Amino acid sequence: MPLPEKALIARIRKATKTRAPSVVAGIGDDAALLKIRPGYEVLVTTDFTLEGIHFRREWHAPQVVGRRCLTRGLSDIAAMGGEPVAAFLSLAVPRKLPQTWVDGFMKGLLELAKEFKVALAGGDTAESPAGVLADILVLGSVPRGKAILRSGAGPGDAIYVTGELGGGAAGLRELFAGSKLRSRDFARHFHPVPRIAVGKILRTRNLATAMIDLSDGLSTDLAHLCEESAVGAEILATQLPTAHTGRKRQPVDQDLVLHGGEDYELLFSARQSVHLPPKIGGVRVTRIGQVMRNRRILLRNEDGSVERLEPKGWQHFASSGTRGDTS
Amino acid sequence: MPLPEKALIARIRKATKTRAPSVVAGIGDDAALLKIRPGYEVLVTTDFTLEGIHFRREWHAPQVVGRRCLTRGLSDIAAMGGEPVAAFLSLAVPRKLPQTWVDGFMKGLLELAKEFKVALAGGDTAESPAGVLADILVLGSVPRGKAILRSGAGPGDAIYVTGELGGGAAGLRELFAGSKLRSRDFARHFHPVPRIAVGKILRTRNLATAMIDLSDGLSTDLAHLCEESAVGAEILATQLPTAHTGRKRQPVDQDLVLHGGEDYELLFSARQSVHLPPKIGGVRVTRIGQVMRNRRILLRNEDGSVERLEPKGWQHFASSGTRGDTS
């Protein structure tokens, strides 16, 4: 294999030296070998992170790209009420990519992995014909029959969301506008946190009837949840927890709250009789609406008017007319 | 998401309709949910298939690319003595790719999946900035403690290989030379078969001490096995099973036998006292050498001379000076 691959493998191998108890054998064999606790089922999720589609090298530091890459997978495990066990990284880089970029990417990814006690247990490397291509696989586990699916919402259930909405997309909008951003002013964009702890608490206490993570935007992900549960929903515009961004901590526009992607918060339903605290695992939880038998998805505005909430969620960079020109 | 993704997802969803018993929930949720048999460990392997690196659209029909994509993952599971449980496909395609290409790719992949009773249980889709990008994940299982690792070879063990060698690379060499090939004349290149059955028999009968699949070429993969086992080896040139290709079924050159990649045969070691039949699971098995305590890897020629067998294996298309110009 070409030299960049060897260097990559060396780096990934080094990253996997501290073997997790669940990983019997990792890199250095044909496949990774993992133990799953008796009575548990396996969760598997894979997510692309492609240069020019999900990030741009001139906008995103390599640490940010690495962190966001793993966040996507961990957030999916959180949305099932699961616990992450191991991650696998498939990474293809162009021949001329500076080694420091790969180092930064791995640093960001591994810091998050350490934070959530996830072993990096393998993957693949290749030379990329164009741009950085990453595919992250996260394997998790959940007690048998206890995963929180998208399909369990019933009419009358209350709808909740964790954290605040629109912060992920607000950073992206500013980047498209040509702004230079301080990452601390747009933390949800540059430093997203997967809601593993919240998901686990909801599962262990049997609080949620259905759940999904907000990666594509509230309107689109709510539509997914409603479709799988064969229900509709009514959302109260006044109840939506709005992110505040920028130096002045200003509230983001409502269209970002409704349709902005990559917040990696959790959207879930719970029986109306269940009483939820205002915070779960230290994270704010807000009731934003109700599940309806009628399969339409509606938004009730402050003035009492009601409109259809069309799924207009995340289309990555492709929607912005400037796609694919960064690789 | 852009339209090609929706079409892709619809196709992949359709492909996953026939739910395997091991798959509790597949596409349509945040993560796939899988059952693993009690007493079994989980095997995980991921492999890129990148246009311009692993295939070329003008050389390889989409069915061939799809089949080879999944073969890479199944072969890794075979090399652990495991049984495949589920596959996950991450696929990014350029906006202008004809839908018929994706259909052909899925057809080739799903035919092989059906042959080996592997469920396609999920994945990810995206728009690709350049060329077709696939990452295949195969999840398998193996009884606890029974996986055949690369690290178990001991001095004195005999070294075996399944099938014939050099056929995969022979097809590639002809393609580079500008030849039009009939796929039946180069079956190992266009229609590789992962050795799942052989791997399982070797595992259930406790026949192999170490095993690896031949994806990078004998010289390179033998070096991997020896490195992980901390041993050396002596290979007998006269004993190597040589593939025959082309209309006239001519033997391929020795350099392809020694260094050609993508044969997807199994290389394994067995105690000298173990008597192996000439065929296992209908596949020819040939003794080609011996594991040595001294960590050098040697090739003994017909005239009795001995030379170092340097790892000169598979470098994909990158080694041929014509890389990356097809996307």
Image (cartoon, coloured by chain):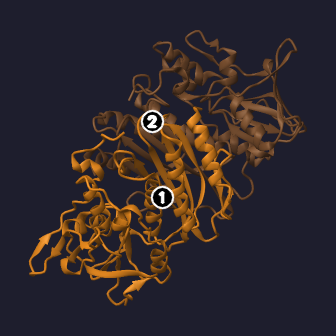
Chain colours: A brown, B orange
Left or right for B239, reference A45: left
Q: Are marks 1 and 2 in contact (CB under 8 Å)?
A: no
Where residue B295 sits, quadrant-wise, is: bottom left
Q: For the residues carrying marks 1 and 2, which lies nearer the camera in this image? A: 1
Q: Secondary structure at mark 2?
A: helix
Q: Which residue is mark 1?
A: B70
Q: Quadrant of residue A180?
A: top left
Q: Which label is found at residue B92?
A: none
Image height check: is B240 above or below B110?
below
Q: Circle 1 — which element?
A: helix
Residue drawn at x 24%, y 44% is B322
| Residue type for callout 1 | Leu
Give the residue at x 63% y 64%. Answer: B36
Residue situated furthest top in the rendering: A248
| The N terminus of chain B, quarter of image | top right
Tell me if A292 is positioned left or right of A66 in this view. Answer: right
Residue that numbered label 2 is attached to: A108
Relative to B236, say whether A175 is above or below. above
What residue sits 75% from the left and 22% below the top? A240
Q: Chain of mark 1?
A: B
Q: Relative to A44, is B224 above or below?
A: below
Residue A215 percent across, percent down from the top left = 62, 33
Q: Label 2 marks which chain's residue? A: A
- Amino acid type shown at disc 2: Gly
- Residue B288: x %, y % from top left: 26, 79
Q: Quadrant of the C terminus of chain B?
A: top left
Of residues B253 and A169, which is closer to you in this image?
B253
Looking at the picture, how far across and down is residue A231, in whole percent? 83, 38
Q: Quadrant of residue A62?
A: top left
